[in-house]
Image: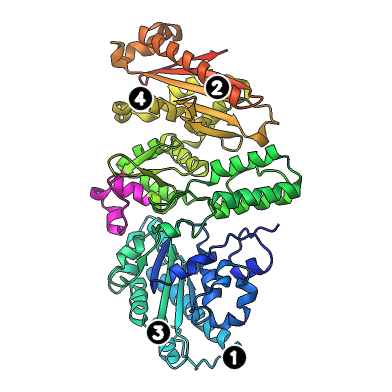
Amino acid sequence: MKFPYGMTDFGEIVTNGYFYCDRTDRISLLEQAKSQLFIRPRRFGKSLLLSMLEHYYDVGRKDDFERIFGDLKVGKNPTPLRNSFFVLRWDFSCVDAGGSAEDIRRALFNHINVSIDGFMRRYRQEGYEIPQIFIDPDDAITSLGNLINGMVSLPCPIYLLIDEYDNFANTIMMLGGNSRERYEELVQDQGILKTVFKTVKSFTSSTGFDRVFITGVSPVVLSDITSGYNIAENIYAHPEFNDLCGFRKPEVARALSDIAAACGFEEVLCDDAMKLVEIYYDGYRFCREASESIYNPTLCLYFFKYIAQRCTFPRKMLDANLAVDQSKLRYVASIPKGRDILTSLMQRDRALPVSDIVDRFGLEDMLDQAVHDQDFLLSFLYYFGVLTIAGEDELGRVLLRVPNLVMQSLYVERVQRMLLPDPEVRDQGIRVAEQVYQKGDIGPLCSFVEETFFQALGNRDYRWANELTLKTAFMTLLYNDTLFLMDSEPEVGRRYADLVMIIRPDMRRYRILDVLIEFKFVPLGKTGLQGERVEMMTDDEVRELSEMKRVVDEGRQQVRQYGAILEKKHDNLRLQKFVVAALGFERVVWEKIA
C-alpha cells in the first residue's frame, strides 16, 4: 500500500493506487451554494480537497472522468455539473509575505498573472479556442478583467478556486514590528487584497466566476475585507462537512490493519499502533453536532508511510515539517489573560467554556486588549487547530479543549519558555527531570522547582497558587512524548491521578521507568507561618507540620490505589510512585512509595 504523504494532486493519488479516503459524495452538497468559505487548520488536507474539485469540474478533464472517478462514490452517481467549467486556481501560500506592502502587492499580482497565463496555455493546448487575453504585468486586476471579458463568448463559465486565501496575510500579522501597518495597507479600502476580492465579487456571475470556493485557516482576514467580499457562505462548521478533510477511526484502523498484515505485525502491535495514532492525532471536531472526532490526515499519513516502509514506529510522532506555528501561542501568551489560559489548557482533556465560538474578528480585535476575553482567545486558538470542540456544558456553552498529545506538547513548550525564559535554566531543569524516569530519583527535581521554578512564578501568581500550579511546574519539565504516553489527570478506577507517564510500547526496550505522581498543595495560611520562617525550616520539619502530614498521608493512599490499578491494566510496568507536596511557593517535600 502506498501513502500520499506530502502529495496534493488528486488525479495522481487516485489513479496510482495511493491510499485515499473517499469524500467525493460531498460534491453534491457543495453544489448547493455558489460561493463558499471552508476553514481548517494548516496541514489538514485543504489543498487535496481543492484538487479533487478541480479534477471533477474541469472541462478539460472530461475524457478522464471514468479513469479518475469511476471507482469513487461520485463516479457512480455524478452530478450534472461535472466537467462543465474552466477552472482557475490561485494558491496564496505562494505569495511572499516579506518586504513592504508594495513588494507584497507585486508578488500577489505576479501570482495572479502567472495563473491566468497558465490557464490560457493549458486550455489552448487542450483544443479550446481561448481568445488572446492581454496580461498587464503591472496590474493583475486589469488582467483579471480582460480574462472575464474575453471568456464571455465561450460555452463554459469559470470556477475559481482560492487556496490558503489568508496565508500571507496571517504571516504578516504575526511578524511584529511594522507588520500592523503593512497588514492594514493590504486590507484597507484601497488595499490590494481587499481590491482583489472586490474584483472577484464584481465578476461573480453566470458569465464570469460562476462559482468560487475558498479555503483558509481563520476568518480573520475575511473579517477585515468584509465589504470587499461578503457573498461567501461559511460552511466550515456544518456537520455534514466535519470530516470533509480528515480521517475517521474505521479508515485509520483499516490502514493500520493492512500495514500490519504487510509487515507481519502481531495483533498486539497493531493495537499499539492504533492506540498511538488515537492519542497523538485524533480528537478534532469542527462543529457541535458532529457525532465523531476525526484524525489529522497529514500526521496519519506520516505515521502510515513510516511504519509501512520500516515496519517500526517513528520515534517522533510529530514531523517537524508539520508543527503548528508557535507564533499563535506566543501571541496568546503575550496577552495578560492568555498566560493563565495556556497554563490551564496544558492539562490533557481540560475543557474551557465559551458562550459561542467567535466567527468574526479582525486585526483591530487582535490588537485591542479590551476584547481579549476568554471567548476571543479560545476561539482564536480553535481556528488554528490548537483547540477543538469537546461538546457543551449544562449551561449551553461550547467546550473547547486540546485535541491530542501533539497539540498538548506545544502548550507545554510555550509554558516552559514563558516561565523559564533562560535556555540554560530550562536545560538544567530538564536534566534533573530525567533522573525521575532514568533512576527513580525525584529529589533533584523537587529542589529545582523549589529553588528556581517557584521564583519564576513570582508574587503576581500567588493568588492562583494551588495544586494545578504545582503540577504545571513539574509537568513542563517532565514532559516527554517521545518516550512516554503522557497523561495529566487520567481516569484510574473512576478517580483521577495527577500525572502518569507510561512508556510507549515501542520504547519499552530502553532502561527507563514508568512514573506516577500525586501532587498536594498546602497554602501558607493554613499553617499560620510566614514565608521567611518556612524557608528556614529543614525538610523534616516541613514534613512534620500537621497539614503537610495530612496531605502526604492522603496522597500515599491514592498513589497505592492508582498504582495497583495501573499495574493490572498494563503489562510489565516499571512503575515509580511518588507523592509531592508543596507548602505555598516556598517549600517542596516528597516521598517515594514502595
Q: Which residue is mark 3?
A: 208
Neighbours of disc 2 within 10 Å: few (<14), some (14-19), many (20+): few
Magenta segment, which residues?
A: 354-380
Nearer to us of marks 3 and 4 is: 3
Evaluate whether residue 32 shows in this view. Answer: yes
Please identify the quarter of the rendering in which residue 522 is found.
Answer: top left
Q: Alpha-carbon distance for marks 2 and 1?
A: 71 Å
Mark 1: secondary structure = loop
Earlier sequence position, callout 2 versus callout 3:
3
Q: Which residue is mark 1?
A: 127
Nearer to us of marks 4 and 1 is: 1
Earlier sequence position, callout 1 versus callout 3:
1
Q: Position of residue 122 (x, y in %)?
A: 57, 84
Q: Which residue is mark 4?
A: 466
Amino acid of disc 2: Ile
Neighbours of disc 4 within 10 Å: few (<14), some (14-19), many (20+): some
Please identify the quarter of the rendering in which residue 363 is found.
Answer: bottom left
Amino acid of disc 1: Gly
Earlier sequence position, callout 4 versus callout 2:
4
Nearer to us of marks 2 and 1 is: 2
Q: Which mark is residue 565?
A: 2
Picture layout, residue 490 above or below residue 107: above
Neighbours of disc 1 within 10 Å: few (<14), some (14-19), many (20+): few
